[in-house]
Image (cartoon, rainbow, N blue to C red):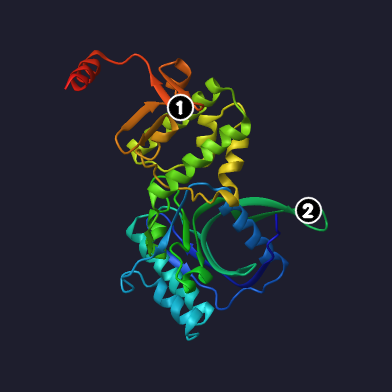
Amino acid sequence: MRTVEHLLTHLIVHALVREPGAPSRLVLRDMPCAPDAAALRLAERLRAQYDSRSAKGFGRFEEDEEAFPLARWLHAHVIDETLDFTTLSRQLAERVQAIADEEELEDGGHLIVMRVREGDTDALWVALLGTAEGVRVVGTLDLLDCTHLDFSALHAAGRIDLSGWRRGDERYLGFLRGRGKGGAWFKRVLGCSDVMVALQETKKLVATLDRFVDTEQFAPATRDAVLERAHDYLDTLGEAGAPVVFEELAREVFPERPERLDALLRAAETKIAPGFVPNRRAIRPLVRFSASGENWKLEFERSGLHSGAVHYDSATDTLVLSGVPDYLKRMLDEAASD
């Protein structure tokens, strides 16, 4: 696997202060942070925490740039070069404050805005991090209280692929979905319009699950059981309108060794974007075969191949169906006598 080099070009930290019984307030920094070792560690920790979360949404900017101004600001910053990074970050902080107040969010934190070169990709990251109280040991081995950024308290985060945005890619914006209000309010901050094509992503997921059971070389009965569990779980998600989370899917489908399936689902070459709601029609091939010819159309359960209800003979290119219901027998007899 090729290692992607990262270059931190800009980073700034602002604070959103929320206190009980008082309006929120911003503490704004006047200039970017120095791109030193500490800034680079912050950037890498933030990226790692974001990447470890599987519940993400993806999309592109909303077309209404008056209601969702980030695209307009980025055009001025990235393309026209008339808006400097500090001003961009301050406008973002003010938008975060306004929407957080509208949503009556309880959590404040530190707003991190950074621009990173990720190999050939230019990306803008925006995140709201909580803090935690800790203890540090100084050179004299005395203990001092300290407050530090808590990467496990990542309240919201988004990543904009600026290179993909400039190319006109279909999806160049990602954000953490979270739970409850979760990432919905931050999606407004970014001005993200979901363009997740659930049908396409579900088809890719079904193909990946088929490839997984082939790679594992399961016995037919085990293969059917794994795919049936996948179908039932995804169908439940689809009915509830809940998004796919790879880690949870792997535990449900292959509890014996979920890490193997989870790794395949997350692999770059698989190209499945997490966070979509499964299309219930598209998961049918996990438990059902369907096909049609010039004069026929056929659909049957995968398990029928092993129960004897359906027999396929590749040598004669024929399918034999057993247990034909009485009503179909009568219809066939009548048709044959015409």
Q: Secondary structure at mark 1?
A: helix
Q: Nearer the viewer, residue 78 or 156?
A: 78
Q: Residue at x 51, y 61 (%)?
A: 127
In the rendered structure, which amino acid carries the disc numbered 2? Asp
Q: Earlier in the sequence, mark 1 or mark 2?
A: 2
Could you say which is closer to the camera, residue 276 or residue 94?
276
Query: Between marks 1 and 2, how big is the CA–CA gap?
Result: 59 Å
- The amino acid type found where label 1 is placed reads Glu
Label drawn at residue 142: 2
Please tell me whether residue 186 is drawn above or below residue 229 in the rendered image: below
Whole-percent x, y for residue 228 in the image: 45, 27
Quarter containing the N terminus: bottom right
Q: Is residue 240 above or below residue 185?
A: above
Q: Which residue is mark 1?
A: 228
How far across and how far down the image is residue 22, in percent? 38, 60
Picture residue at 38% right of the left edge, 47% below the top: 199
Q: Note whether residue 23 is visible.
A: no
Q: In the picture provided, is 238 more to the left or to the right than 263?
A: left
